[in-house]
Image (cartoon, grey):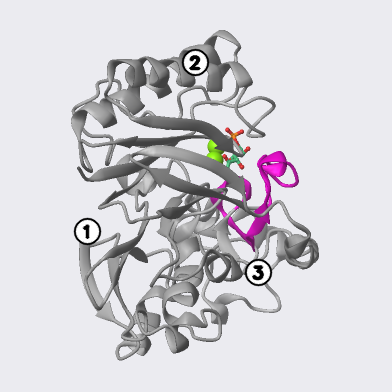
Amino acid sequence: DKITLSVIKADVGSISGHYMPHPDQLAAATKVLSEAKQKGLLIDFYVTHVGDDIQLIMTHTKGPDHPDIHGLAWDAFQAATKVAKELKLYAAGQDLLSDAFSGNVRGLGPGVAELEMEERKAEPVITFHADKTEPGAFNLPMYRIFADPFNTAGLVIDPRMHAGFVFEVFDVYEGKSVLLKTPEESYDLLALIGTPGRYIVRRVYRKEDNLLAAVVSVERLNLVAGQYVGKDDPVAIVRAQSGLPAVGEILEAFAFPHLVAGWMRGSHHGPLVPVSMRYARVTRFDGPPRVLALGWNISKGRLIGPADLFDDVAFDETRRLALQIAEYMRRHGPFMPHRLGPEEMEYTTLPEVLERLKNRFVKTEEVKVVKRHSEMLSGEHD
Ligand code: F6R
Ligand code: MG
Ligand code: MG
């Protein structure tokens, strides 16, 4: 039987602002999933969090987008929301944008990455969980993992990877995807995914046999709710080894703390910091954005792990650099490019400010030196 690994996440409330979920919320979600495991709906599961997002990592044989699995995730988030409300946690239930579940959490609010696989003799998989950023934050590392030989030695020296990979890129505004082959279409690919707020690497296939190697969640809460209600903190699944990038090649792509959109009020650029489970919470300026990497082996659907892959001195220099970048970016205060451009901000007072100042904008030639300052201030120039 084919096994499906489903990673579904949502922010349904947090202790102390957006710091992290309360342990009782995780316990409530765990209870719902363990009942489903007893009933045989799930083979296995693991519940954790990064920042304020609860992460449900589940295995089953139902395939992607199955209403029973999505309904289960919905119930788990509802249970965690109930706790959040009782404890008066912050932003209780914020990602559950609809009160009625209609068979599929896609488009409702929670983020989803699902990968159906024929289990290999050994099946090493990494799940990535990020907070205070958007799905496009994975564009740069996905490119480096599957298309950059300076990151992934196997692209050059492993015969099974030498033909390259195919990227599915999703345009979040048009709701359409395009398939691009690497290495031959690398420049086209980069032309798109260099705009990570719009073009998102959604899936990656091995060219030789179309094996699905990686999946990224592409939900955009802003478009879902019809208004910008939050950066959709993303998740990703990447399969490793034996003709795919090695675990170490996959992690290597996160050794450079690139700038991503998100952070405070979903409206700032900051470095993506690789963290261990211990530091999977947010503090400074509600961040900085961070990513957790959990290593698994899947055995007949059982989840063996997790290995807390960024919990190592090998990433200390990345973190040190990231924190320097965080400091540097913060000193820009309300200025771009720390603050996002007007079309990308989650919160904005710009329309209000412009409306209020409307009558005070004058053509340059009308601003005579003799014009009295008080007239300009009061908007009485005509
Ligand atoms: C970012 C995030 C936080 C909040 C911020 C303000 O994704 O969730 O940075 O935007 O704490 O929250 P409110 O407006 O609810 O006080
Ligand atoms: Mg949040
Ligand atoms: Mg979050």
User: Mark 1 and mark 2: span between their CA atoms?
Assistant: 34 Å
In the displayed orientation, state which residue is furthest to the top: 86
- Residue type at tag 1: Gly
Rendered location of residue 277, percent (x, y): 66, 41
Per the image, the residue denoted by label 1 is 175
* Mark 3: secondary structure: loop
Residue 287, above or below 210: above
| Mark 3 / mark 1, whichever is N-terminal | 1
- CB within 8 Å, label 2 to label 3: no
| Mark 2 / mark 3, whichever is N-terminal | 2
Residue 195, disc: none
Per the image, the residue denoted by label 3 is 255
Q: Is residue 150 magenta?
A: no
**Label 2: how many residues lie within 10 Å, few (<14), some (14-19) or many (20+)?**
some
The range drawn in magenta is 263-288
214 sits left or right of 82 in the view? left
Rendered location of residue 373, percent (x, y): 72, 64
46 sits left or right of 70 in the view? right
Numbered marks: total: 3
- Residue type at tag 3: Ala
* Mark 1: secondary structure: loop
Q: Nearer the viewer, residue 150 or 221?
A: 150
* Mark 2: secondary structure: helix
Per the image, the residue denoted by label 2 is 28
| Mark 1 / mark 2, whichever is N-terminal | 2
**Label 1: how many residues lie within 10 Å, few (<14), some (14-19) or many (20+)?**
few
Residue drawn 22% across the image and 45% down it: 2
Residue 381 picture quarter: bottom right
Mark 2 vs ligand 2: CB under 8 Å? no
